[in-house]
Each structure stands twice: as structure tokens, then as C-alpha cells.
Amino acid sequence: MTWLLMVLAWPVQAAWTWSEALTVNSVQGAAVFPHLESANRQGVAVSDDTVGVAWEDNRDGGPQCYLSTKSAGTTTFAPEIRLSQSECYEPVVVALGGGRFVVAWEEAGQVHARVLPDGAVIRLSQAESAQVTLATGAGKLYAAWAERAGKFHRIVVAQLALTEDGLSVRFAQPVEARVPKDGQSWPALAVAGDGSVTVAWEDRRARHTVPMVSHSRDGRRFTMPVRLSDKKSESVEGLGAGSGAMRTTLSAWGKQGVAAAWLDKRDFLAGYDVYAALDGGKRRFGRNLVVQDSFGDSMTQWHAQIVGDRQGRLLAVWDDARDGSPDVWLADWNGKAFGDNEGVPAASGPGAQSDPVATLDAAGRLHLVWLDRDEATGTRIRYARAVRK
């Protein structure tokens, strides 16, 4: 039966041609656990012809953050650079060009950033803070994070500047000035082609998790937050305050647009599904769109990310176990809907392949990184590149 489901679920014609998969991390073992989890899932970036991958693992006995790079024409990733000195979580990376990257992470209860290969580490906030993410666009660099204000955390957005030593914070301020009455976490950030900034996050003001979104023309003054989900979640059979949604991701898309994807539990019997919404440039998201196809509707989806570029290409990646074990799936936007789901050859089949992070380079090639778990030998971080057929 599993074999039959695989045949039925596999697209007749795959839209992408994939390279051979490479292993990124140099240290594996049954007791070493790499993680690609981060706010907005910004775990891979491409700077000209160089790919950078950021992750966290416990090879040294506690969580530390790392970055490894691979130049075009080489068949292996370089030995990783350790980013942190004390316990570190949820690193992200974006490209600057010229083979340079900006990385950010949480360490010792605060968020930090650094230009690589040779920049100095700076703290982005003096307050307790977590779940940092980065975004570039229109010649500017922004960061967002969850920062404690009173009893709870709220979302802060900062514009960063490049300096001789690496980075500085030009300004930083909360999306909402008032002290939050409940938690805000896991920000996602995108800079559209017109330079406007969109930020989304998980919000608990309704006593359950709701994806909220706000926009700014200049990165300083943000609009009143509104719900990203178009279905008002309610108590299910008298249980809880609502079904909830989580882990919103954002991507710049086309000349001025922004695309969003998140995990949504409005169909509570099937668990989380991947939903998306598109903003064509009016700073208003349209109706919610289901991303997984009918073969994935009865399965729980995890680790969704939306991936777009300035040329208008758009797709989503995630993992689910519709074929009996976790595999990585993707769906392309065809202008009207997300199409048939396509499995990634090297990230499908026996075993557990999960936690995808992805980006498109300037030529429209897709760069994908994921976890490949083996209980006996440990977890490999894997990388593959794809081009459209």
C-alpha cells in the first residue's frame, strides 16, 4: 500500500532537475544533533557564486552555531566556522554579495550578528532577546527579533549598517510601542523591491497563537498589526481558545510583492497544513491559499518556508510523512495556485529527511538544505541545487 501511495503521489513530470546531494557538516554521530530551526528559516544564502549554510549542533557538549560555505566549482563544503562562544540557538544567514554574508544568532540570552568572513561580533540588543532573523533589499539590511518588555516579549525591527569593522545598529524600535499583554515571537522579515519592510510573527493576544503582520515604508513606523490568517480561529468542541497557527515565513516576491507561508491548524483533525498568502505590492495580503495537494491533506506538514525572488519566481518547501516517513516536498506557484507537490529525489524515500531551508539565486536556481537522519550513524546536513526543466 505504501508503494502504491508513492506512485500516486509522485508528479508525472518533475519541474526541477537536481544535482547530487552533498554533506555540509563535518561532524556526525549518534549523539550529535544538528538543528536548522530559525526565525523565517533563513538557514541558507547565496553570495555571488558562494553558498553559505548556518546551523546549530551539540558536538562540543552544548549548543553552538556554525557556518560553512562552498564556492562554485568545488564539490565539498569548507570546514565550518564556529560563530558562538557560549550556548547558541537559531542562527540565520543572508548574502551581501562578493562572497560575504551576514549571520545572526541568539547567544547567552541576547541576539548577535557578524559579517563574514572577517567582521566583528556585535550585540543587536542589550535586553533579553531571542529568535533573530535578517532580510536584505533595496540596498538595506534589517534584523528583527523578540525582545523582553515587561512580562512578555515583543517584536523589534532594526536597520543595520555596514562599517569598517563589520556592522552597527542604525536604529531599532518595537513594531508596537506599548508593552505587550501576551507573548510575541518567531518574527519573519522581508524587504520588498520598493524598500518597504514587512514583518510577521506569532502572537498570543487572542490567548492562542495567531499570525500577525505589519508593514512599514521606512522600517521605522509600522502599521497597526492585522491577522495574516483570513479564518478567525475559534474554540474547537469547547477546547482551547482557537486552533492556532505558527512559524510564519516571508519572502520578497516580484518587483514589489511579498509572499507569506505558515503552518495552520484550522483543519484540526489533520494537524498543521501549509497555508500561504500573497501581497502584490499594495501592502495587503490576499486570501489564504492551501499549498499542499490532496495527497498531503490528511497528513501533518512541518517546517514550511516560502521562497521567492525579484523575477517573480515563487515556491514553498516543507516536510511531511505522506509516504510513511518524513520527506521534503515543494510546490511551485503557477500564477493561480500552488501546483502538484514534487518530492526532492535525494530528500525522499527510506529514513527521515526533514527541516528544509531554501533560497533562489540570481539565476533562478534553487538551493536546498535539509536534515537526513540515521539513528545509527547520526544526522547529516545535506545540500542540493536544482534548475528548472
Image: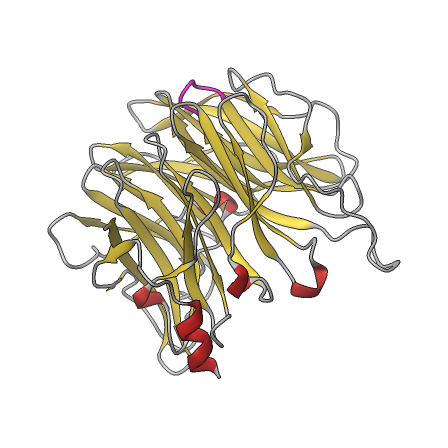
Residue at the location (39% across, 29% down)?
A: 254
Give the prevailing secondary structure in the magenta stretch.
loop
Q: Which residues fall within the magenta stretch?
A: 191-196
Residue at the location (62% across, 58% down)?
A: 272
Residue 205 found in image quarter: top right
Residue 163 found in image quarter: top left
Q: Tell me if residue 349 is in the magenta stretch.
A: no
Residue at the location (83% across, 53% down)?
A: 235
The colour scheme is secondary structure
Lateral position of residue 230 relative to residue 130, left or right: right
- Observer-nearest of 295 and 312: 295
Q: Tell me if residue 195 is in the magenta stretch.
A: yes
Residue that protrudes farthest toward the right in the picture: 238
Q: Is residue 34 visible?
A: no
Residue at the location (43% across, 38% down)?
A: 335
Count up the numbered dots: 0
Residue 348 found in image quarter: bottom left
Measuring from the top left, give residue 328's x and y in whole percent: 41, 62
Measuring from the top left, give residue 78's x and y in whole percent: 20, 55
* As drawn, 387 above or below 296: above
Measuring from the top left, give residue 130's x and y in whole percent: 57, 43
Lateral position of residue 358 relative to residue 185, left or right: left
- Observer-nearest of 196 and 87: 196
* As drawn, 272 above or below 145: below
Measuring from the top left, give residue 1's x and y in whole percent: 48, 84
Lateral position of residue 149 relative to residue 294, left or right: right
Q: Is residue 98 visible?
A: yes
